[in-house]
Amino acid sequence: MKEAIHPKYQEVEVRCACGNTFKTRSTKPELHLEICSACHPFFTGRQKLIDTEGRVERFTKKFGAQTAAQRKTAATVAKAAAKKATTTGTKGKKTAKAKADVTA
């Protein structure tokens, strides 16, 4: 091995977002984790929502927090609006097809 080209391999303290700390060896001077074995659902057996750095909050703000029921309601409203738009002409007059549907 060549001398003085390898990074220094040192003992460091690893800190998790949950507050857990442990020691390991690394070439980096310090390590910060978002999730570790003490808080990971696979190891703990319990599910929890992990909001690192406000990512979940930013996502819900950007896209809105919709439930499945709200999405279904929005889809039916959109379908009704699309159906209404196809039955009326561009000037608000009913088309021949719409008139035939109404009389039938």
Image: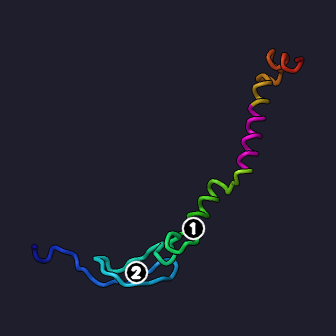
> As displayed, is residue 23 above or below residue 41?
below
User: Which element type, helix, strand or loop, lies under badge 1?
Assistant: loop
Residue 38 in magenta? no
- Tell me how many marks there are: 2
Which element is circle 2 on?
strand
71 is within the stretch colored magenta: yes
Q: Furthest residue to the left?
A: 2
Q: Give residue 94's position: percent from left, percent from top.
A: 83, 20
Residue found 48% across the figure and 72% down from its top: 35
As drawn, is 35 to the left or to the right of 28? right
Q: Residue at x 89, y 17 (%)?
A: 103
Neighbor class of circle 1 (other Cα within 10 Å; few <14, some 14-19, many 20+) is few
Above or below residue 40? Residue 98 is above
Q: Amino acid at mark 2?
A: Val
Which badge, 1 or 2, comes first in the chain's sequence?
2
The C terminus lies in quadrant: top right
Which residue has dot 1 on it? Answer: 54
In front: mark 1 or mark 2?
A: 2
Picture coordinates of residue 37, whole percent (x, y): 46, 75
- Rendered residue at 58%/69% (across/down): 47
Look at the picture and state if 63 lies above or below 89.
below
Mark 1 and mark 2: span between their CA atoms? 22 Å
Query: Magenta stretch mostly in which secondary structure?
Result: helix
Q: Which region shows up in magenta?
A: 70-82
Q: Residues within 10 Å of mark 2 (few under 14, many from 20)?
A: some
| Image coordinates for residue 13, horizontal then vertical, percent | 38, 84
**Which residue is denoted by mark 2 in the rendering?**
14
Q: Amino acid at mark 1?
A: Gly
- Residue closer to the observer: 40 or 16: 40
Q: Return the residue nearer the eye: 36 or 98.
A: 36
